[in-house]
Amino acid sequence: MRTEHPSNQLFAITGVAIRIAAIGRAWSLQSRMPVVRADADALLFSAKSFAAAMLAYYIALRAGVPKPSWAIVTVYIVSQNSAGASLSRGVYRFAGTIVGAVATVAIIPCFVNDPIVCSVVLASWIGLCLYLSLLDRTARAYAFVLSGYTASLIGFPGVFNPAAIFDTASVRVQEISIGILCAVLVHRFILPKRMTGQFTARLSTTLRDARRLAGDALRGSSGQALRRDRDRLAGDLLALQGLAVHLPYDPVPVSPSRETLQLIHDRLARLLPLATEVEDRIHALRTGDHRLPDELTALLDGAGHWLASADAADRDAVAIRLIDRARTMRTRKATETVTVGDRLAANLAGHLAEMIGLLRECDRLERIIVRTGARTVTAAARPPDVASPLRSRRRSGRATGYVYHRDPWMAARSALGAVAGIVIGCAFWIWSAWPEGGMAVSILGVCCALFGNVDTPAPNVVKYMVGSVAGVAISLVYSFVILPRMTDFASLVAVLAPAFLFAGSLQARPPTTYMALGITLTIPILSGLGATYAGDFAGALNSVIALFAAIGFAVVSMSLFQTIPVDAAIGRLLRLNRQDVRQRALGGGPDEAHWTSLMIDRTALLLPRLRLSGKSHPDVLDDTLHHLRVGHAASRFHQAIRHVDGNDGEIGHDGFELLTAIALRFGSGYRAGPSDAVALHRRIEALTARIADSSIKGRVQLLDPLIDLRFALGPSDAVNWENGR
């Protein structure tokens, strides 16, 4: 096979473009058929990726780089299902490649006389990159991953050939840059799939789920229905964030501003615990000795009808009237409180005003995103704060946005496990003097970097191995049966198309992505797709042995050193929740919006782990919501109690003692019994009654968080306050 001077390369690339256009037309015609839409999307992605790979291969051949197959590999690593995601991944891959190459060039010459030390330093660099990627958890994490990935690919094969390390790093950067450029250009300009459309569609679904959650709370639906709606909304927020990070890279004239996205996230995140607060108050007022006031019943009915309304213009006007009614009712009830029921009604009215205001703001922000695409939320466009009139409840004017849970200890555990596995592999390679050991260890490092970002990476490596088996079989057929017969670039493109188009369609489907990567990353390298045919069966066999030895050892190593049992991960998250609640009760911790968003992210992290756990965890998500509500109410009460006048120091002293007792309850090693919970509830009730009977300034600001604490610390059916004051 000779491809140095092809006669009809442009014809081949043009033919691929024509096929892409045909698939695009079929995709457009079938876009209204959900059954075939996924297949059409996968085929379109596969065709575009293959066209980008062949374009990168052609350019690499013309540029004369030593291993043009790496340009093909890069295309399939960078390519994503949307233009924005492909560009962001390409940018971070390029940055990671540059940093990894520079680090390798700096490390290898410094330890030229000590291969063991050099290998340990390279392994430590890979571990550091993995640690930073696990801490980051955003799209930027891919840059850290690629820094370690590149160091592994370039560094370990160069341990015994340090003189060539600079040239190797330089040409590898060139090959990878060609692949990045071609992948980005094809996915951006040929039938681009825009992330903005996916985001707005998902946002619409999320707001519909938010209204369903609010409606269930107003109707007093079963706890199971409310729990299901909460879990769905938490998953929606994580999915929205996953899409939003790529919006700045989307090929659209104007994209939603970061502040707009942060604002809508803050509102939706606050709605999750707020819906439970509303449902608890309604349940308490409809049971026992209390009754729901007629005006509050009418307000609830009006809010329910408003949620079901489809007219956007009418919804906004009705929302303003409902908020005014709720705030008026709350002010009157708060100043005329006679019974516990009055205090609960006032508290419920305040929460209703906040919930309706949140949903109204979300509607307005959605219109800003969909209709105007404004880059900033101007003072005129910014929704007014229509939540509770209490100063402590007013949200900060600065948006917080999605807050990621970061656990340095767990990240360090995974990173050290990767270092240990790579060092053991290096020790065996150097001790045995295995000629292909450098290649094997480089593949091991790649596995640790690429797959080490989950609790149990070994199953994903196994999927990659299954794909590699298929890739090896296809590569051997290509290398020794098909490629020797190829004489021009066009015929080469034609024979490569079936394998790559099939693998690309698998890569577009999440369940088979890792298996597809095993195919698309193996064929170009093992088949020796270079400028000329250079079939070497012995060399290919040695490479196959190194490949499977490395992947097999990676499965064992990652199972031993990088696997975190799912139940241990769940327990770790719950312990951190309790520690943070304790900190907030003592007056520490971040602001309310940051705290709420952090707990939403932890909920989203728990959802997949609970599905994987072999044990039953029916109350774990309820515990997370319980921690969120207690931390929120305790922090608000701590802020309010600090402003108690000096003449009312006894109430202030008792308030701080109550918060200390709550902090103790959430401390490590504390085992609460039923009597402890009852005693804590009675302390809250007694302090509430004293504050209600006092003439203390800011009485309402103290009563509200106390009521919230009482509900948050116990299930709604345990709330059975005595009548009277």
Image: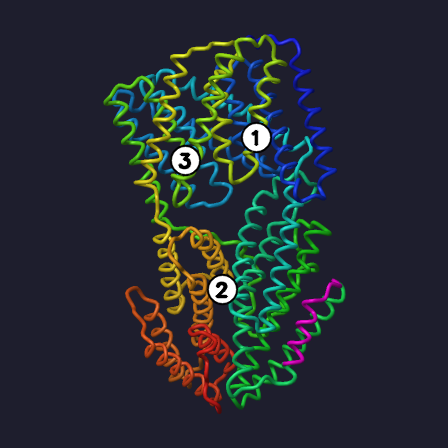
Contact between labelled residues 1 and 3, with CB atoms less than 8 Å apart = no
Residue 25 lies in magenta, yes or no?
no
Q: What residue type is labelled 1?
A: Gly
| Local secondary structure at mark 2 | helix
Q: Residues within 10 Å of mark 3 (few under 14, many from 20)?
A: many
Q: Give the range drawn in magenta.
A: 297-312
Residue at 46% x, 80% y: name it: 719
- Can you give x and y, in whole percent of width and height, for residue 293 in the image? 61, 85
Q: In which quarter of the image is the N terminus?
A: top right
Q: Is residue 686 above or below residue 441?
A: below
Contact between labelled residues 2 and 1, with CB atoms less than 8 Å apart = no
Q: Nearer the viewer, residue 380 or 715?
A: 715
Quarter of the image where one finds residue 472: top left
* Disc number lying in front (3 or 2): 3
Q: What residue type is labelled 3?
A: Val
Label for residue 504?
1
Quarter of the image where one finds residue 113: top left
* Disc number lying in front (1 or 2): 1
Q: In this view, does 708 lie above or below 583?
A: below
**Left or right position of 92 against 409:** right
Label for residue 461?
3
Q: Which of 539 and 180 is in front in this view?
A: 539
Q: Is residue 487 above or below residue 149?
A: above
Residue at 51% x, 35% y: name it: 92
Label for residue 592?
2
Label 1, label 2: how far apart the Cα atoms are: 45 Å
Q: What residue type is labelled 2?
A: Glu
- Of the two numbered discs 1 and 2 on the same chain, state the one appearing first in sequence: 1
